[in-house]
Image: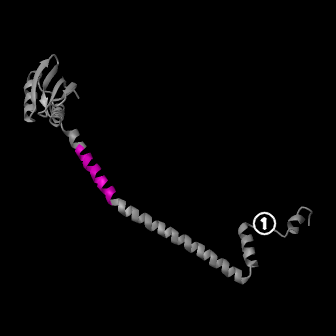
Amino acid sequence: MTASSTPALASGRSPALSPIARLRAWYAACAPRERRMLVLAVAVVLGGALISTAEQLAAERERLARSLPAARLAYLGMEQDSLGLAALRERPTPTAPPLAALPDSIRAAASARGIEAAARIAGDRVEVGGRATLPALVDWLATLHAEQRLRPTRLELQAAGTDGLARFDAMFEVGGQ
């Protein structure tokens, strides 16, 4: 034997043994009673780990089962929104009415909602003044924008009186998007 190999043999360890081989050698050196206790301990630890994993899987499956109907409803809602958006895209853009006809059509839309309104053309804009309840006024403004392509550029409101009607003055731009 050479001088370099004597220290490894003197310590009682073989330099070629892997950690698994050392573990097997240690286990083989244990008494039969210790081996049974070690096997039992490993079985208990593995059983506990399996039970814990099974409980976590069951809890997660339950959570997913509860959240699936909500996800399906959200998906159906998005699908409906998508269909509605596609229908809106296919609908042709309304054409702007002729400028001379705007005051009459504005007054007609206002009177249909119970709004007192007077309209007149001022250059390339339309000035409107009148009295209305706030919900009717908001609905009317949205209708003017959607159907007649009028966009309010100025809107002044005065507090509602005892009759519940607020005074308003508005300026509309023709053909606004």
Please name the residue shown 72% across and 71% down the image: 23
Nearer the observer, 40 or 138: 138
Please name the residue shown 46% across and 66% down the image: 57
**In which quadrant of the rendered image does the C terminus lie?**
top left
Question: Does 155 sit left or right of 44 as displayed?
Answer: left
Identify the image quadrant of residue 130.
top left
Question: Does 80 sit left or right of 60 as displayed?
Answer: left
Q: Secondary structure at mark 1?
A: loop
Image position, residue 160 (x, y; %): 16, 31
Q: Local crowd at mark 1 within 10 Å, few (<14), some, or many (≥20)? A: few
Single out the residue that lies furthest toward the bottom: 32
**In which quadrant of the rendered image does the N terminus lie?**
bottom right
Identify the image quadrant of residue 110.
top left
Say which residue label 1 marks: 16
Image position, residue 38 (x, y; %): 67, 77
Q: Which residues are magenta?
A: 69-84
Q: Is residue 137 magenta?
A: no
Query: What kind of residue is marked 1?
Result: Ala
- Above or below — where is 27 with respect to 141? below
Single out the residue that lies furthest toward the top: 123
Image position, residue 75 (x, y; %): 31, 53
Q: State the predominant SS element of the stretch in magenta.
A: helix
